[in-house]
Amino acid sequence: MKKQDLVIVGGGSTYTIGMVMSLIAEKGNFPLKSLTFYDIDSKRQEKNAKATEIILKEKYSEIEEFTYTTDKEEALKGADFVFVQIRTGGLEMRVKDEEIPLSYGAVGQETCGPGGMAYGMRSIGDMIELINDIRRYSPDAWILNYTNPAAIVAEALNRVFSDDKKILNICDMPAAIMVSYADILGKEIWDLVPEYFGLNHFGWFSKIRDRDGNDLTDQLKSHILNKGFVPEDSEIADDPSWQKTFKQVQIMLKDFPDYLPNTYLQYYLYPDNMVKKEDPKYTRASQVMDGREKRVFKLADEIIGAQTTEGADLEVDIHGRYMVRVAASLAYNVGDIYIVIVENNGIISNLADDAMVEVPAVLTNDGPKPLAVGKIPTFQKGLIEGQLAYEKLVVDAYFEQDYNKALQALTLNRTVVNAPVAREILDELIVANKEYWPKLN
Ligand code: NAD
Ligand code: G6P
Ligand code: MN
């Protein structure tokens, strides 16, 4: 088994230490020769890196080299895989993405609605620059991107790098939901085979089967309808915000019983309720800064202070494991089926070919081979087409620097709808993002 040279871009991320733990848990499936962190923020990255040195010394002695740097060339040379997890503007800008729409009574969320548009318009430029740099130094590396908003990033990258078949955009949400399904069914997530369709953060499970082919969908639905739904993955299980989000799945399923919804659909189907639930002065971004961010860097400090991981609360979560298993399937031609983001090209047969859709695919060393979905029903098709038009208009607005397209995008979005509100939110987002967005004319 060839050992891999892996680079993590965004080494200072709150997900880095969890990813390191996943690489350790999955070392039999995806063995590493070297691991490199790259980030533009040396201080933020250094904490994760110093803790990682100790973690690897104790738990991954097989790894030959671990380095971290803010030098692109040094970091990106000779990689087999590059995982990308950056956040342009940081969590400080996420606060604005969420607070501004909420102040106009619209959903304020990281990836959904106006917040997602604002974050997307910040991410696209950095992502294009990064992919160009990765290709300069590692022309054949697999690039796994989970930088958000993944739907908009995927659409933009697919336009600019249309010939590059080794960029794959992924989201962990379907897998995080499947962890809860597995718990209900008394199985491991890896025993479940999903059928799923939609866009990123905008899709449905149409079937859940086990590896023997038994259809478990009805059992799952009736459990959720009768007993509710809770997060089980270690990263989110104890988080009140995620608990509320999973609870909403029961309501969505009661209202629309055909398919099992992705949790993110709550923002599009119940926007008014979602706004009412939020404190516009203490949104999810602030909760994450006081929660995950503080927790992760405190953990790193403890490990560095003690110079050992003994007694440290290190956990393996589905986010990291999912990304690593996807990488393993691509690297070693395993042919496992995972839900990923790919160009449609007839997979959902009554949806445009050039949509970036989220569907199950067989992952081989020749890339993802998505499985046919066929025709989807009118309700889901209508919702998806509206959202898809929004996503395409955001990317158009970015490349064409077109104010009107940005306004059209927000007006189309189910979380906004009213044109005058869309204009007010857009104008305030433009001011807040003046250092990041292209100038819209
Ligand atoms: P974070 O702000 O803690 O970490 C991001 C890191 O990226 C920071 O250390 C920052 O300095 C660095 N960075 C920013 N711009 C960079 C650039 N141009 N080059 C190199 N490094 C750069 O954010 P986080 O909350 O840990 O999330 C990281 C990313 O992962 C976000 O985009 C988040 O939305 C995404 N994410 C996606 C999924 C998914 O399912 N797709 C799941 C979890 C997280
Ligand atoms: C899920 C989504 C990600 C999102 C993450 C964190 O895993 O798939 O896209 O970034 O949740 O959300 P949070 O609100 O907890 O930062
Ligand atoms: Mn996601």
Image (cartoon, grey):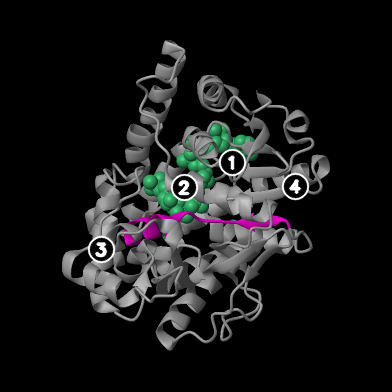
Q: Amino acid at mark 3?
A: Gln
Residue drawn where x is 43% and y is 80% of the image: 380
Residue 260 appears left or right of 15: left
- The earlier-in-sequence mark between 1 and 4 is 4
The reply, left or right, for residue 215 in relation to residue 67 is left
**Circle 2 residues within 10 Å: few <14, some 14–19, many ≥20:** some
Q: Residue at x 75, y 43 (%)?
A: 134
**Region of the chain picked out in magenta, as a range:** 166-181
How far apart in space, not on screen, are marks 1 and 2 (Cα)? 31 Å
Task: Please give the residue where the numbered disc 4 appears in the rendered image.
Answer: 141
Marks 4 and 2, the one that precedes in the sequence: 4
Position in image of residue 249 (x %, y %): 28, 65
Does the beta carbon of the residue at mark 2 sit less than 8 Å from ligand 1?
Answer: yes
**Mark 2: which secondary structure?**
helix
Foreground disc of the pair 1, 4? 4
Q: Dot 2 corresponds to which residue?
A: 319
Left or right placement of residue 106 versus residue 59 in this view: left
Q: Earlier in the sequence, mark 1 or mark 2?
A: 2
- Identify the residue position indicated by label 1 in the image: 435
